[in-house]
Image (cartoon, helix red, strand yellow):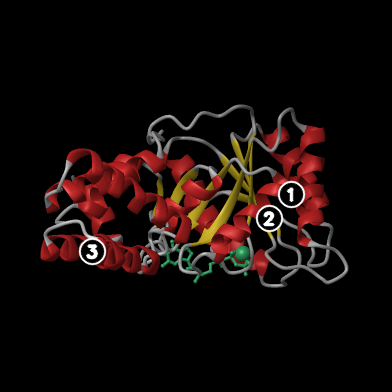
Amino acid sequence: MAILNRLKERLSRTRTELIGSLARVVRGHGCLDAELLEQMEEILIRGDVGVETTAKLLEGLKEKSRAAGQLKPGQILAILRQQIEEILGDERSKESSLPLSSTPHVILVAGVNGTGKTTSIAKLAKIYLDRGRTVLLASCDTFRAAANEQLEIWARRLGVGMVKNQPGADPAAVAFDALRAAQARGIDVLIIDTAGRLHTKSTLMEELKKIKRVIGKQIQNGPHETLLVLDATVGQNAISQARLFHEALGLSGILLAKLDGTAKGGIVIAIKDRLNIPVSYIGIGENLDDLERFDVGKFVGALFSDS
Ligand SMILES: Nc1nc2c(ncn2[C@@H]2O[C@H](COP(=O)(O)OP(=O)(O)OP(=O)(O)O)[C@@H](O)[C@H]2O)c(=O)[nH]1
Ligand SMILES: [Mg+2]
């Protein structure tokens, strides 16, 4: 219960401004007509559910109402909730069992600058440490001089090792060294931080592909996870970022950071509906404990409570 309350509190802006507003107009209006549908559309789009996914949700409502006759407000909201749950699918939380496919289990973390990669990596490391796993971090953001330092601070706080090189070094070479070190030390999980921005000479995608290739040569099926960190506050642009990274890297999941403090949490629904890439984790704050495995039931439950 405490966990649900925390999630509810962190998602409060989306809960009140998206789901709460929908509930208010539905209850205030009383019946599903063109005017209500228009109001709902506006709220859904403002909450970043996206044009296509919004149209799909409202079409579903219209269909149900055609089949079942005039819907009561409670029914409208229940159908909406059910449709959102259907879009989000049945990804249940794997809270207690984070399977490790290999030793080390290698997680490559990518994303454009400022989305929350480094912070999220620290939180992810904490999740594994809390489950008794050993963790090594690799600082492959060799673009920014301060990047090593930033990850190093987290590594120190977490009490884990970190592999780095000089700014300007080849990120793939750092990844290679880190993997070697993880293998030599028998580390369970290697998490690789990467740059969000690069020199104009090379493209970010080529750099990331190279890191992936180098790891794949060194360890079977590596990297075992390729996570894209998206900033939940940037709006629909997150969808195009995800498309580009998925095309280049083949993502295993999305880590959606900064869901706290935004009213635009509808982006979760848009991501799943438009891209069909699982949202694996959500970031709900700036502290080490503020990362959760995404759980549809918990997420929808938190959003719809009080509505
Ligand atoms: N509120 C909130 N802030 C977050 C969350 N995740 C990250 N941040 C903040 O976002 C800012 C950027 O985070 P970083 O981890 O440095 O992002 P980055 O992607 O590594 O940035 P670059 O290395 O510059 O590309 C920091 O101020 C973080 O505290 C989150 O879930 N919630
Ligand atoms: Mg960073």
Q: Amino acid at mark 3?
A: Leu
Quadrant, the C terminus: bottom left
Element at badge 1? helix
Q: Are marks 1 and 2 in contact (CB under 8 Å)?
A: yes
Looking at the picture, does residue 69 appear above or below residue 32? above
Disc marking residue 248: 1
Residue linked to disc 3: 36
Disc marking residue 261: none
Residue 107 in view in this figure: yes
- Mark 1 residue's CB less than 8 Å from ligand 1: no
**Residue 120 in picture, x, y percent from top left:** 51, 56
Q: Is residue 36 left or right of residue 130?
A: left
Q: Amino acid at mark 1?
A: Ala
Cα gap from disc 1 to disc 2, whole angstroms: 6 Å
Looking at the picture, does residue 27 appear above or below residue 299? below
**Residue 182 in picture, x, y percent from top left:** 69, 38
Crowd rating for badge 1 (residues with CA inside 10 Å; few <14, some 14–19, many 20+): few
Q: Earlier in the sequence, mark 3 or mark 2?
A: 3
**Residue 301 in picture, x, y percent from top left:** 24, 46
Element at badge 2? helix
In the image, ligand 2 is in what quadrant? bottom right
Q: Nearer the viewer, residue 67 or 203?
A: 67
Residue linked to disc 2: 244
Q: Is residue 141 left or right of residue 7?
A: right
Residue in view at x 56 percent, y 49 percent: 160
